[in-house]
Image (cartoon, rainbow, N blue to C red):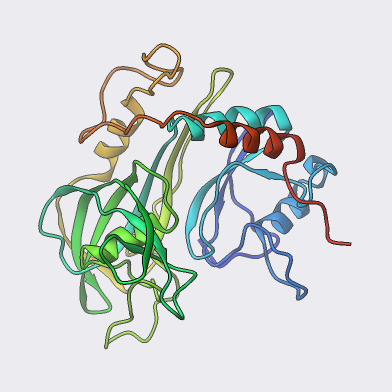
Amino acid sequence: MEPGSVENLCVVYRSRDFLVVNKHWDVRIDSKAWRETLTLQKQLRHRFPELADPDTYYGFRFCHQLDFSTSGALCVALNKAAAGSAYRCFKDRRVTKAYLALVRGHVQESRMTISYSIGKNSTEGRTHTMCIEGTQGCENPKPSLTELVVLEHGLYAGDPVSKVLLQPLTGRTHQLRVHCSALGHPIVGDLTYGQASSQEDQPFRMMLHAFYLRIPMSAECVEVCTPDPFVPSLDACWSPHTQLQPLDELVQVLRAAPDPDPSEGGPGPCSPCTPLPGPGRPPPPPETEVQRASCLQWLSEWTLEPDN
């Protein structure tokens, strides 16, 4: 992908109720900044002005979030009912997400489960970041699980690097970035939880990409697989030399994995029969009255009204 502009929005899925876009790196989803800045919301308004909903502040209902620096699959609901269906899937942890990343060093284990609890960092100067339990200043750490599979070993700008597939089984802020950093293998280009190498002043982007997304709603299964951006033909700094696991085989496993059904405990509408390797998804905690009220408020208003 070339850098984002208002004209080059990439749509990978479209139905009556949903759009899935392949978000560019270093593009915000939305912004209230006074200065002119590129956002996904502006790209959507430019491409699909007829789909913008005047009842929402930003015009579009984003079903989930991606960091400013992260590229890849992001789902947009085109009406309130569709947004509610997607919200329930995310709340019940029925959504399958997988990311591609380039991380520093050669990860020695071919696959692993990362289970560091993650909390907010209260250290002065780091209050907008997260950290793992046991770190000084770590507040309210919560259990967090990430599955990691090593795809390739190689070099990036002369430094040892691994290409990995990451599957978050929980949804903590900056989870993948924090977990990779805690392993001693920070994501290439992550200047918050890692650092540039001596041979490389700064990569042109953070090497984290939302590769696969499946939202198994009863009326519609949204399932997309975005193009792999971490290939030598797109970035001459990346030079793989050893393949440990073919990506296309993992895609087949992801597509075949059953979706938990919270009502019956059986497979959902997208599901054949092959389970995803590694431990199962943790069961969703019971919804509290406060969470239920928050959900209803969110669905009725969706976004804050513009400031007066």
Tally of numbered tags: 0
User: Which residue shows up at 37% across the image and 87% down it?
Assistant: 201
Residue 36 x, y percent position in the rendering: 75, 73
User: Which residue shows up at 65% across the image and 56% down it?
Assistant: 40
Above or below, 299 against 188 in this view is above
Furthest-left residue in view? Answer: 108
Residue 118 x, y percent position in the rendering: 34, 56
Furthest-right residue in view? Answer: 308
User: Which residue shows up at 70% across the image and 71% down it?
Assistant: 37
Image quarter of residue 191: bottom left
Q: Is residue 293 left or right of residue 133?
A: right
Q: Is residue 52 left or right of residue 195?
A: right
Furthest-top residue in view? Answer: 264
Above or below, 233 against 203 in this view is above
Q: Is residue 139 left or right of residue 43?
A: left
* Quarter of the picture holding the C terminus: bottom right
Above or below, 308 against 169 in this view is below
Residue 159 x, y percent position in the rendering: 21, 77
User: Which residue shows up at 55% across the image and 29% down it?
Assistant: 88
Image quarter of residue 153: bottom left
Residue 133 x, y percent position in the rendering: 28, 60
